[in-house]
Image (tube, helix red, strand yellow):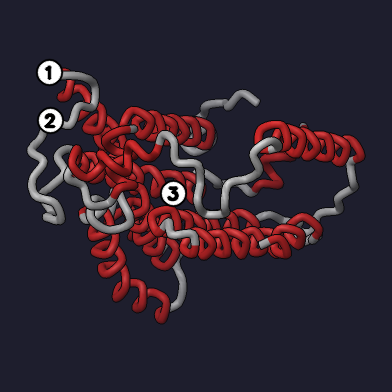
Amino acid sequence: MKGMTVIVKTITDFVVGFIVVFGAYIVLYGHLTPGGGFAGGVIIACAFILTMLAHGKDVAFSKLPEKVAHVADSGGALVFLLIGWFGVTVGFFFMNTFGRGEVFRLLSSGMILPLNIAIAFKVASSLFLVFSALAIFRRRSFRAMIEDELA
Amino acid sequence: MIVGSIVAIETRNLLSAVISVAAVGFALSVAFLFLGAPDIAITQLVVEVLVLIILIRGTILLDNTAVESHRDTLAVVTSLIFFGLVLGFGAMIFGGRGFPEFGEPVMRVSRVYVHTGLPATHCANIVTSVILDFRAYDTMGEATVLFTSILGALALLRRDGKKKEGEVVAA
């Protein structure tokens, strides 16, 4: 997979930054406007997948190495769990212990914002990993695999 | 939507089936938007795009995209039975009182969230306050499901990707 034509590559370079910024906006304002960690994470993953489709997998892995994606995937889940356990120190699991802040401000609503960010990291890296797994680990064609299985 | 799903079932070309399913998904996103659920509409739209990319790549790389299907009588009978069960249970539950008005559901549990959501969490978006504060435990389960599926997918697909030199892979 060496990538597509020059037109696609140029437009991709131009657009990817905007897509990532929009995804970050969806994540960070998830508690004020429609959206949230899951939708924003998928948008960020789409940006990296667009890079992979246009430029091929080498460029995409230089932007987001596989190790980093693994760490972000596991770390997002871990941070989510840790925030939940942080509530145990005060009251119960997932108790909203952080400062609530003022309504309609960015730094409001306690633990919802960090949870959104954790979910976004997790979803973005894991969906990117799924796509790269489908793209990389298929050296042989499906037909050869099926014939091997049948043989 | 209904036309798209019928086309997706009946067509013999896998690529056009995938595209019809995508059309159903986009129509569903618009339907969510009209019902006043922009959160779900955004998520549906974005996930639909991603799944469409993956499915089209998978479909194009397949050698034979045209499928000769034969109609299975067992499948038809089973789906008819389940359709009847759904109708029967629906009549049992809603039969006496009639259906609630479309778009105005029975607000028994959710009334608490709607009334206490803003003062309890100071979160302007009620959907986010529900899924990440009142129901954060469920969201953690969802994250765990995603994590486990990634683990499974990587473990399954890695078999002939990370093969050592001279190693024989068990069939």
**Label 1 crowd (10 A; few <14 / some 14-19 / many >=20):** few
Pinpoint residue A53: horizontal percent, then vertical percent: 44, 63
**Label 3 crowd (10 A; few <14 / some 14-19 / many >=20):** some
Which of pointers 3 and 1 indicates the residue nearer the eye? 1
- Upstream in the sequence, badge 2 or badge 3? 2
A45 with respect to A17 (left or right):
right
Chain of residue at mark 1: A
Q: Residue at x 34, y 47 (%)?
A: B127
The secondary structure type at the circle numbered 3 is helix
User: Which of the numbered marks, if any, corresponds to residue A89?
Assistant: 1
Chain of residue at mark 3: A
| Residue type, mark 3 in image | Ser
The residue sitting at the front extreme is B97
Q: For the residues labelled 2 and 1, say whether their Cβ atoms are less than 8 Å apart.
A: yes
**Label 2 crowd (10 A; few <14 / some 14-19 / many >=20):** some
Q: Residue at x 28, y 42 (%)?
A: B115
Q: Name the residue tied to disc 3.
A: A132
Q: Residue at x 79, y 59 (%)?
A: B66
The secondary structure type at the circle numbered 1 is loop
